Image (cartoon, helix red, strand yellow):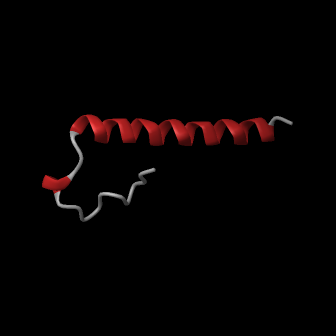
Amino acid sequence: MINKYTYIGADLDNLPDHDVLASEIIENIEARLESFRVIQKELDK
C-alpha cells in the first residue's frame, strides 16, 4: 500500500503509469475509508 511519503523525492520519470498510480491512490483511499467505517462502528456501540 502506498502512503503520502511513497513518492517524495522520487524521480518523476520513474513513477508508475498514470493508470497504475491512480489505481493505487484509489485503493489507498478505499482502505482508509474502511478503517474509518470500522472506527465508526466501534464508536456507535
Q: Does residue 44 sit above or below 8 in this rendering? A: above
Residue found at the very far left of the displayed protein: 13
> Picture coordinates of residue 17 (x, y %)?
21, 41
Q: Quadrant of residue 33?
A: top right
> Residue placed at 38% from the left, 41% from the top?
24
> Picture coordinates of residue 3 (x, y %)?
43, 54
Say which quadrant the C terminus sits in. top right
Q: Quadrant of residue 42?
A: top right
Say which of 15 and 4 sits in front: 15
> Residue placed at 29% from the left, 39% from the top?
20
Left or right of 11: which side holds 32? right
> Residue placed at 30% from the left, 42% from the top?
21
> Picture coordinates of residue 30 (x, y %)?
51, 35
Say which of 45 and 24 sits in front: 24
Residue found at the very far right of the displayed protein: 45
Q: Quadrant of residue 4?
A: bottom left
> Picture coordinates of residue 28 (x, y %)?
46, 43
